[in-house]
Amino acid sequence: MKRITVFCGSSSGTEENYTIQAALLGKTLAEKNIELVYGGANVGLMGAVADGVLNNGGKAIGVLPNFLRSKEIAHKQLTELILVDTMHERKTKMNDLCDGVIALPGGFGTMDELFEMLTWAQLGLHKKPIALLNVDGYFDALITFTETMVNKGLLKEVNQEMLLVSDSIDELLDKMENYVPPTVGKWISKENI
């Protein structure tokens, strides 16, 4: 993998370890010569992961909607800042630029980005690894919820398994490097319509 998109909060949250792990992920990406693609902000966990990359000689590419740039949250030291018009264009551009995705703790925006990438993978629009860095069990309830989706017949187990999870950065990157996408398609085929 040459580039990884990281989705995470524009806030830091209540736990100091979220910021520590975001910065450590950035440092690890830089050490492994993997470029960061992220939302372009200098605040919260977004700023921490970018600083982790940049402070260790790595490259960070931000993708920021114009309306957020006007709020002066754009990171000033990025390798490259790409401006787009809409949030959807932002997700599309981040997908186009990356070889895989990691989600760190975040709120609705992070979940929206994560689930859109999962949906695109489920539909076969990409075959990239999608991973959760489960810092201090942040995603435990979400993982349980995906199990409920499977148990209630609303998600195939093979699609649930697309979501790679670890609380260790190195283990997560290893899982991503060795990821094999599912060959099973979505529920409905053209023949069934």
Image (spheres, rainbow, N blue to C red):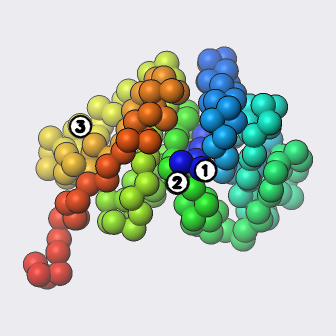
**For discs 2 and 3, the disc positioned in front in the rendered view:** 2
Residue that carries the numbered disc 3 in the rendered image: 147
Residue that carries the numbered disc 2 in the rendered image: 99
Q: Residue at x 75, y 40 (%)?
A: 58
Q: Which residue is drawn at 62% across and 24% down?
A: 21
N-terminal of the two: label 2 or label 1? 1
Hey, what amino acid is under mark 2?
Asp
Residues packed near mark 3 inside 10 Å, few (<14), some (14 to 19) or many (20 plus): some
Left or right: 177 with respect to 34?
A: left
Q: Residue furthest left?
A: 192
Residues packed near mark 2 inside 10 Å, few (<14), some (14 to 19) or many (20 plus): many
Hey, what amino acid is under mark 1?
Arg
Contact between labelled residues 1 and 2, with CB atoms less than 8 Å apart: yes
Q: In which quarter of the image is residue 77?
A: top right
Percent of width and height locating residue 55: 81, 31
N-terminal of the two: label 2 or label 3? 2
User: Which labelled disc corresponds to residue 176?
Assistant: none
Q: What element does badge 2 sit on?
A: loop
| 122 up-or-down from 75: above or below | below
| 10 up-or-down from 100: above or below | above
Residues packed near mark 1 inside 10 Å, few (<14), some (14 to 19) or many (20 plus): many
